[in-house]
Amino acid sequence: MSDTRAVNVKMPLVVKNRQGQYRLKPTKSFGERLKLSIKRYWFFYLAILPGLVCVAIYNYGPMILQVVLAFTNYRFVDGIFGSEWVGFNNFKVLFTQTPEIMRIIENTLVMSFWSFIMGFFPSLILAIILFDVHSRKLQRTAQTIVYIPYFFSWVIVYGIFYALLSNTGVLNSILKSWFHVTEDFLMDPKYIRTILIVSSTWKGMGWGTIIYLAAMQGIDPTLYDVAKLDGCGPIRRIFAVTLPGIRNITVFLFVLAIGSILSGGITEQILLFYNPANYSKSDTIGTWIFRIGYGMFEYSLGAALSFLQSTIGMILVLIGNHIAIRRYGVGIW
């Protein structure tokens, strides 16, 4: 009877040498390939080593500390790793002993939704409009004008909107002169969300436009000529040529934007614009963590809420990326 026992043998690979001859070469394990790569390209690995160390210290280090803080009752005298381990008690305190938590989550979701809508579509629409402008000089001029606010810090942006919307600002001066009324826009809760969304859109729209315009430059111009021969008008060409041509970058940005659905907009911006008078509509997870976690030294509660926010964002990115790959064949990795 023949021996039918399985033999653990690595399957060979057929490779071609410089002389054009084929030979069998056994496969190597990942560890063997890594050692060979380091031995062959040691200088390049040495060159990127400082960058990897910085990423480990300044990116992954704080993430580890955040996780530890989220499950401990942090005290200065005990330190991060010496504080009492309390498990999920910080999360329990957040949802049972923090009366404003639901309002904060609601504000965060509303702000995130409108930030996502106004951060995604205006840039795309403006990019399509500029791409169809035949005058290169006009296109570059408009692009520069739209892009300039991106370089303004949020302090400068707040100063501009304060000059427009404060009690003694331009808009109130016009209202007082024409209608004999004034409105405290920056203090009234019913206006604060609109102000935040408008200022964020105005500042960031130019950056998004640059990205979409760069993607549109890669579209084959002959596709537009063929679409014209087929009778497609300007609007039809957008849906038949332009949007499919930038689908990859659009899906990429869409998936990344999903991860910030619990960010509630830009925290630095909100910290400048909000005040106790409009907390009911402007206080988000980021501002609460800054005000309570840092301002009142509740580091463990702040870390717990931040950990929850980051975890949900990561899960949403993974789900969105999986759907994008299955539906469009495009993902962020």
Image (spheres, grey):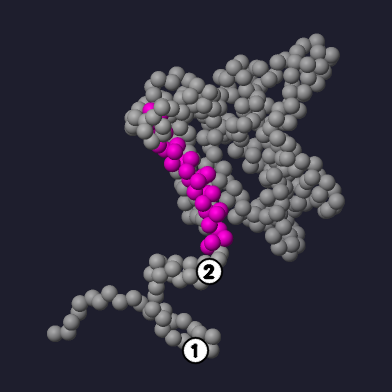
- Drawn side of residue 193 relative to residue 139, left or right: left
Q: Is residue 126 above or below residue 271?
A: below
Q: Is 198 in the magenta? A: no
- Drawn side of residue 285 relative to residue 185, left or right: left
Can see residue 56? yes
Q: Are marks 1 and 2 in contact (CB under 8 Å)?
A: no
Quarter of the rendering containing residue 2: bottom left
The residue under the point 56% across, 64% down is 44
Disc 2: which residue: 41
Amino acid type, label 1: Gln
**Number of residues whose C-alpha sits closer than 10 Å to that of mark 1, classed few (under 14), some (14–19) or many (20 or more):** few
The residue under the point 46% across, 47% down is 319
The location of residue 173, given as percent across then percent down, is 81, 16
In the foreground, 76 or 170? 76
Q: Earlier in the sequence, mark 1 or mark 2?
A: 1
Residue at the front extreme?
Answer: 77
Per the picture, the main secondary structure of the magenta-coloured stretch is helix
In the foreground, 162 or 252? 162
Part of the protein shown in magenta: 45-74
The residue under the point 52% across, 42% down is 259
The location of residue 158, given as percent across then percent down, is 71, 28
Callout 1: SS: loop
The location of residue 255, given as percent across then percent down, is 54, 47
The location of residue 36, given as percent across then percent down, is 45, 71
Residue at the top extreme?
Answer: 180
What is the CA distance from the residue labelled 1 to the residue labelled 2?
Answer: 26 Å
